Amino acid sequence: MGRTAGIATGRAMGRTEGRVEGMNETIQTFVKDYQEEGLSKEAICQKLEKLFSIAPEAAGKYFAG
């Protein structure tokens, strides 16, 4: 792989990582807000599944402890 191709690959990887990190931060913010509103863990997971098209197992990982 040449230098130019390496730079392009690195930029693409960085953008992807940034999008994933941004989505995770957004979901964590939603979870905190929904918890403050008194929603149950199950209700919050259902909302996350619907809003972000994530699997139930993935939705559960955004809860501490």
Image (cartoon, grey):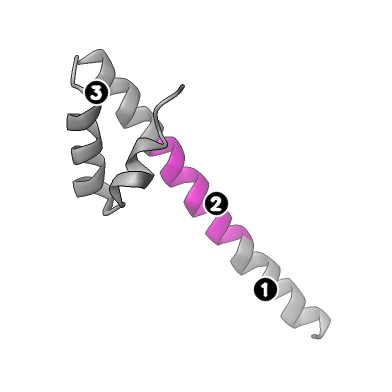
Q: Earlier in the sequence, mark 3 or mark 1?
A: 1
Q: Residue at x 42, y 37 (%)?
A: 61
- Judged from the image, the secondary structure of the residue bearing numbered disc 1 is helix
Crowd tier of the residue under label 3, counting other residues whose Cα lies within 10 Å: few below 14, some 14–19, many 20 or above: some
Q: Is residue 61 left or right of residue 15?
A: left
Contact (Cβ within 8 Å) of mark 3 with mark 1: no
Look at mark 1 in the image and give the residue it sits on. 9
Q: Is residue 34 above or below residue 26?
A: above
Q: Looking at numbered disc 2 in the image, what kind of residue is underneath it?
A: Gly
Q: Residue at x 49, y 51 (%)?
A: 20
Range covered by the magenta-colored residues: 14-26
The overriding secondary structure of the stretch rendered in magenta is helix
Q: Looking at numbered disc 1 in the image, what kind of residue is underneath it?
A: Thr
| Residue 55 location (% of width, % of height) | 30, 52
Q: Looking at numbered disc 3 in the image, what kind of residue is underneath it?
A: Tyr
Q: Nearer the viewer, residue 53 or 5?
A: 53
Per the model, the C-alpha gap separating discs 3 and 2 is 24 Å
Contact (Cβ within 8 Å) of mark 1 with mark 2: no
Q: Nearer the viewer, residue 17 or 59?
A: 59
